[in-house]
Image (tube, rainbow, N blue to C red):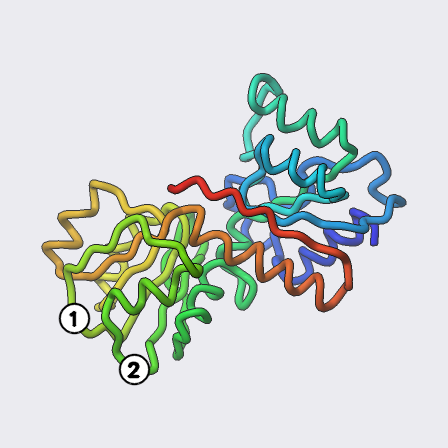
Amino acid sequence: MTLRELDNYFNSFLKKENYANDIAINGIQVENSEPDKKEIKKIAFAVDACEATEKIAAELGADLLFVHHGLFWGHCQPITEALYKRVSTLINKDMALCAYHIPLDANNPYGNNYGLASRLGLTNLEPFGTWKGMTIGVKGELPEPLTIDMISEKVMRIGKMPCAVLRFGKKEIKTIGIVSGGASEDVETAISEGLDCFITGEFNHEQYHTAEEMKINVIAGGHYETETMGVSLVKEKVEKELGIECVFIDLPTGF
């Protein structure tokens, strides 16, 4: 498939047009030399478009890098310093870049939040949490109550630890709201909806006392870690449906 054909394929289920308020530019951010002709034989998937990720993708022979966090965020940016390094690496290697931000957070079933809900085995799923008028998270119920430590172990990748676990609520947890990445403020939505636990990536100082006083459990799994899910699920879908060779580049930041 060509770059244009692949981007149409990605958007057939990620549907960037439904997320017009996203600050990111979704879809193709940097094209290759022949977007309508050159065959994409290998795709690298990663959370972040950075110089290190791009160099690894190039070394692995990827024709396309697909990420959650791209390079362009909806405003004019001079292509200097770090951005120059990132853009020039792509152009010099004739490697295209596709990025899907909020569409990849919100998608059911291939997004970060529904993917984490599936990992936990949540049932009775409902939309949860909004940003700029877009619903991006999910809430649901565990089949049976679990402790916060059991939930932490299930939601994280093998060998990974959450950045923070706040044991402020019930010992036995049944209901959970999830918004990946930097969604600390959505703990207030979780509180207002009577949930037992809130899972996000980063949890800010400003919401700590609110969570403690309102007695809700919080798991901050890490911005990076909670957003490896979407790109991994899209990778699996591409491999299964299109048969294109794919690789996942894991460059955790610890945040």
Which amino acid, mark 2? Glu
Going by the image, does 244 lie left or right of 68? Answer: right
**Residue at the spot 66% in from the left edge and 52% down from the top edge:** 247
In space, the residues marked 1 and 2 are separated at their CA atoms by 13 Å
Up/down of 1 relative to 33, above or below: below
Residue pointed to by mark 2: 144
Up/down of 99 relative to 232, above or below: above
Residue 171: give its label. Answer: 1
**Residue at the spot 57% in from the left edge and 58% down from the top edge:** 232
- Is any part of residue 71 visible from this angle? no
Q: Residue furthest front?
A: 159
**Residue at the spot 26% in from the left edge and 65% down from the top edge:** 149
Q: Quadrant of residue 78?
A: top right
Q: Residue furthest bottom?
A: 143
**Residue at the spot 65% in from the left edge and 47% down from the top edge:** 66
Residue 12: give its label. Answer: none
Coordinates of residue 3 in the picture (x, y in percent): 79, 47
Coordinates of residue 36 in the picture (x, y in percent): 86, 45
**Image quarter in which the N terminus is found:** bottom right
Regarding mark 2 in the picture, which secondary structure is present there?
A: strand
Residue nearer the viewer, 51 or 98: 51
Residue nearer the viewer, 208 or 18: 208
